């Protein structure tokens, strides 16, 4: 299965790059139209065009693989592989002309995430990982930070509305620095040692699917807020490992 896994992982990187090219054609242009989905979150032509492009390429090369995408849902498969795609993660950044949005592609093999890509086209960063092969940022292998104390640790949030106010106060009292360099951008920062942790209270499977392999291959820890090793439980936390339990304890109150 190893060869077919690596071939798919390479395709994932290639598709994330082409997703980025489509995103950049729409980013910060007057042609971009923003619609509200049923849940009130924004969606654009770029989200749909990117997912359709990735779906078509995967269907052509691996027609029996399963596929889950944010905009067009689930397609069943028979090979044990499932592609999980968020065509534009950080759509709010994207539609406000903020260059921190990403294209996310993950590959699941018999229920385990084995490869993942975070492409940040307007920030010029492509991060990818495959099980056992390390985490790579623009061609260089990266590792999480070795900071063990919360004092001076950078803890990222995508948005603070669903945080308990006591968690914010307690992190700050412990000396942590809270910043909203969030969405997948924050996970990229943790994997490359630029920040110590990121916490998301409200997520879907496609928001976090690449994170287990990206963060673990960089030497860090990724769990749900219950501490379980899962990406599809509705929330998530990534860290350098050393500060994981202390951040979890603080953000789980309230
Ligand atoms: C968002 C991000 C974010 C999470 C939000 C999602 P989107 O995704 O993944 O990390 O906290 O709940 O909506 O909608 O920009 O793809
Ligand atoms: Ca997302
Ligand atoms: Ca999205």
Image (cartoon, helix red, strand yellow):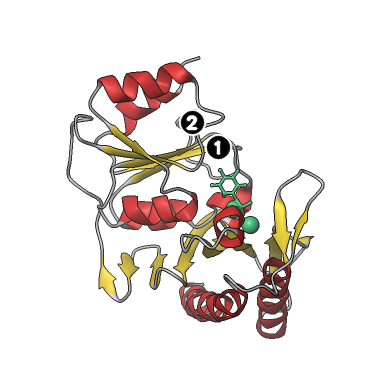
Label 2 vs label 1: CA separation? 6 Å
Tell me which label, 2 or 1, sits earlier in the chain.
2
Q: Which secondary structure lies at badge 1?
A: loop
Q: Which residue is drawn at the image coordinates 42% and 43% (left, top)? A: 180
Q: Is mark 1 within 8 Å of ligand 1?
A: no
Which of 189/173 is in front?
Answer: 173
**Residue topped by disc 2:** 225
Q: How many marks?
A: 2
- Left or right of 103? Residue 217 is left
- The residue most toward the bottom is 60
Position of 165 relative to 215 (above/below)? above
Label 1 near label 2: C-beta < 8 Å?
Answer: yes
User: x%, y% of residue 107?
Assistant: 55, 64
Which of 175/134 is in front?
Answer: 175
- The answer to which quarter of the image holds residue 60 is bottom right
Which of 83/25 is in front?
Answer: 25
Residue 111 visible to the viewer: no
Position of 14 relative to 212 (above/below)? below
Position of 111 relative to 15 (above/below)? above
User: x%, y% of residue 1?
Assistant: 51, 72
User: x%, y% of residue 186?
Assistant: 40, 50
Residue 117 visible to the viewer: yes
Position of 193 relative to 27 (above/below)? above
Which of 206/34 is in front?
Answer: 34
**Residue topped by disc 1:** 235
Q: Looking at the rendered structure, which numbered label has been put on residue 90?
A: none
Q: Which residue is drawn at the image coordinates 25% and 72% (left, top)? A: 140
Q: Which residue is drawn at the image coordinates 30% and 76% (left, top)? A: 139
Q: Residues within 10 Å of mark 1 (few under 14, many from 20)?
A: many
User: x%, y% of residue 159?
Assistant: 51, 39
Q: Which secondary structure lies at badge 2?
A: loop
């Amino acid at each position: 299965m190893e060869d077919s896994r690596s071939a798919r992982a390479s395709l994932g990187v290639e598709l994330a790059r082409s997703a980025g090219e489509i995103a950049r054609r729409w980013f910060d242009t007057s042609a971009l139209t923003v619609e509200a989905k049923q849940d009130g979150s924004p969606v654009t032509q770029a989200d749909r065009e990117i997912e359709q492009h990735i779906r078509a390429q995967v269907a052509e090369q691996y027609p029996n693989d399963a596929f889950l995408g944010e905009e067009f849902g689930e397609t069943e498969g028979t090979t044990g592989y499932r592609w999980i795609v968020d065509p534009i993660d950080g759509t709010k950044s994207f539609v406000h002309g903020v260059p921190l949005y990403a294209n996310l592609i993950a590959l699941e093999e018999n229920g385990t995430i084995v490869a993942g890509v975070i492409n940040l086209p307007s920030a010029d960063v492509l991060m990818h990982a495959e099980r056992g092969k390390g985490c790579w940022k623009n061609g260089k292998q990266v590792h999480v930070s070795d900071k063990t104390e919360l004092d001076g640790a950078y803890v990222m949030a995508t948005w603070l509305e669903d945080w308990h106010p006591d968690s914010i106060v307690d992190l700050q009292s412990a000396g942590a620095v809270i910043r909203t360099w969030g969405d997948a951008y924050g996970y990229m920062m943790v994997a490359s040692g630029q920040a110590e942790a990121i916490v998301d209270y409200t997520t879907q499977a496609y928001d976090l699917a690449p994170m287990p392999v990206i963060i673990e291959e960089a030497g860090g820890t990724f769990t749900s807020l219950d501490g379980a090793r899962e990406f599809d439980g509705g929330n998530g936390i990534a860290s350098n490992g050393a500060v994981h339990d202390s951040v979890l304890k603080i953000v789980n109150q309230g």
